[in-house]
Amino acid sequence: MLTLFKNLPWSAKYTVPPLVVSLLLMLVFFLPDATKLTLTFERELIIQGQWWRLLTGQAVHWGLGHFIMNVAGVWLVWLLFAEYATGWRYGVIIVAIAVASNLGMFWFDPKVEYYVGFSGTLYGLFAWGGVQDIRHKVPFGWLLLVAVVVKVAYDLRFGAVSISGVSADNLAVAAHFFGVVGGILLALVSNNRWQRG
């Protein structure tokens, strides 16, 4: 067990990026509600020109449980895929998937009027990481990618399942779907040298 712990990616180049994302999510979580309302994904306000909401909506959480679950997801991604993107590349991947998730909802799912939460980005990160594992001949990648795609397909067909006390009615299945699509596309167009170099 101690050997496993020592073999985790503890180097700053691996830990600083998810730490920064976690701290940013925490900062947004503790902002006054009036300020958070200026950051949420709201279709009508985006149409009126508040384009920053296509990114910032992914960073807003109203409930503590939702926030903790998403920050835990950031660290699970670190545990599984830290070596695939370090430094500024990690930030680019986060922003690209977050925007893909929100743009997908904005362009293709007009029923989504309002959205908050990082789960669309997390679903995309797991799909992105699964493709990276497959690219690096890690068998777990196939299992993870298939699991994420099946989960999203199930949710699209039958509705989202309640997780950790978060009501299924509040889960944005569209955000998860477009996050996964964004993560897979990003993984396919990026190359190993860009990620590691």
Image (cartoon, rainbow, N blue to C red):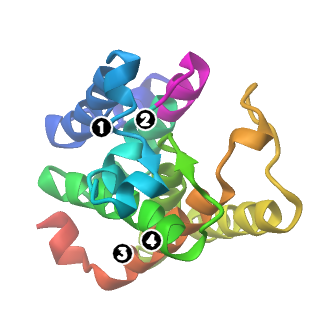
The residue pinned by badge 2 equals 75
The residue pinned by badge 3 equals 186
How many residues crowd around disc 2 within 10 Å: few (fewer than 14), some, or many (20 or more)? some
Residues shaded magenta: 61-70
Local SS, label 4: helix
Q: In the figure, is residue 76 to the left or right of 171?
A: left
- Which of 22/134 is in front? 22
- Could you tell me residue 196's position as x and y percent? 18, 65
**Residue 104 higher or lower than 113, as above or below:** below
The residue pinned by badge 1 equals 18
The residue pinned by badge 4 equals 182
In the rendered structure, which disc, 3 or 2, sits on the residue that comes first in sequence?
A: 2
Local SS, label 2: helix
Local SS, label 1: helix
Q: Is residue 29 magenta?
A: no
Q: What residue type is labelled 3?
A: Leu
Circles 1 and 2 in contact, beta carbons < 8 Å: yes
Q: What residue type is labelled 2?
A: Trp
Asked where in the image residue 57 lies, by quadrant, the reply is top left
Q: Residue 188 carries which label?
A: none
